[in-house]
Image (cartoon, grey):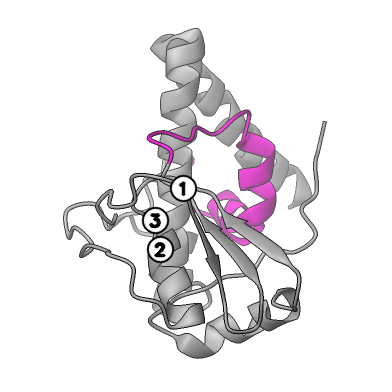
Amino acid sequence: MLILVPNVHALSVNQLDSLDVLQEYLYEGSSIALVGSSGVGKSTLINALFHMHQATKEVRESDDHGKHTTTHRQLFFTDGDVAVIDTPGMRELQLYNAEQGIERTFSSIVELIAQCKYSDCTHSNEPGCAVQAAIADDLISEAHFDNYLKLLKEEESQQRRTVGAHAVKEHYRAYFKKIHSDNKEKW
């Protein structure tokens, strides 16, 4: 079953203009609850949006995650009478059968992978790597590719826990082989 989420917004408190898109949700009488993993910036977002001063901690350089700070649910009312609930972070959120979502979200990268010269390209320093060429030409950002790799790694870890490491390795081998064979058929 595919569930479509109609409103997804990329936000950063380091780019305050990115928060402007949230204004349509902030009307008198609305209620908003922030839910997510521990340390992802829920309290920091509330502080930035509503000029509040909840305790937050710095982001760890080792994994780019914040540190768990909020320990209980808290209800705030903004000057515009919006109810905001800050929740403590969930210790762990896992992907569930994310392969199709990853393919859709990163379709540009999946298409580039199919154009690599070698079917076993690691997309790091091989000659003929379409992904690295696209990054060099600013067609995709390195951050976008890194996010793709992170999600693949998470999905692989989840599948390994579910069906075992060997089955996951064979699954991805077949998946990338299919991408490359489909590409050859097109030519």
Above or below: residue 160 compared with residue 90: above
Disc 1 target residue: 73
Amino acid type, callout 2: Ser
Disc 3 target residue: 40
Looking at the image, is mark 3 or mark 1 earlier in the sequence?
Answer: 3
- Point out the frontmost of discs 3 and 2: 2
Asked whether residue 141 appears in the rendered view, the answer is no
Disc 3 and disc 2 in contact, CB within 8 angstroms:
no
Please give the name of the residue rendered at 44% of the width and 9% of the height, measured from the top-left corner: 164
Of residues 79 and 44, the one nearer the viewer is 79
Please give the name of the residue rendered at 61% of the width and 41% of the height, measured from the top-left corner: 180
- Residue 114: x and y, percent? 59, 50
Distance from the alpha carbon under mark 3 to that under mark 1: 16 Å
Looking at the image, is mark 1 or mark 2 earlier in the sequence?
Answer: 2
Above or below: residue 82 compared with residue 175: below
Please give the name of the residue rendered at 31% of the width and 54% of the height, measured from the top-left corner: 124
Tell me how many marks there are: 3
- Point out the frontmost of discs 1 and 2: 1
Disc 2 target residue: 43
Q: Could you tell whether 37 is left or right of 185 in the image?
A: left
- Residue 144: x and y, percent? 47, 64
Please give the name of the residue rendered at 58% of the width and 64% of the height, measured from the top-left corner: 84
Disc 3 and disc 1 in contact, CB within 8 angstroms:
no
Q: Could you tell whether 96 is left or right of 74 in the image?
A: right
Crowding at dot 3, Cα within 10 Å, few <14 / some 14-19 / many 20+, comes out as: some
Asked whether residue 30 appears in the rendered view, the answer is yes
- Residue 121: x and y, percent? 41, 45
Q: Which residues are magenta?
A: 90-119
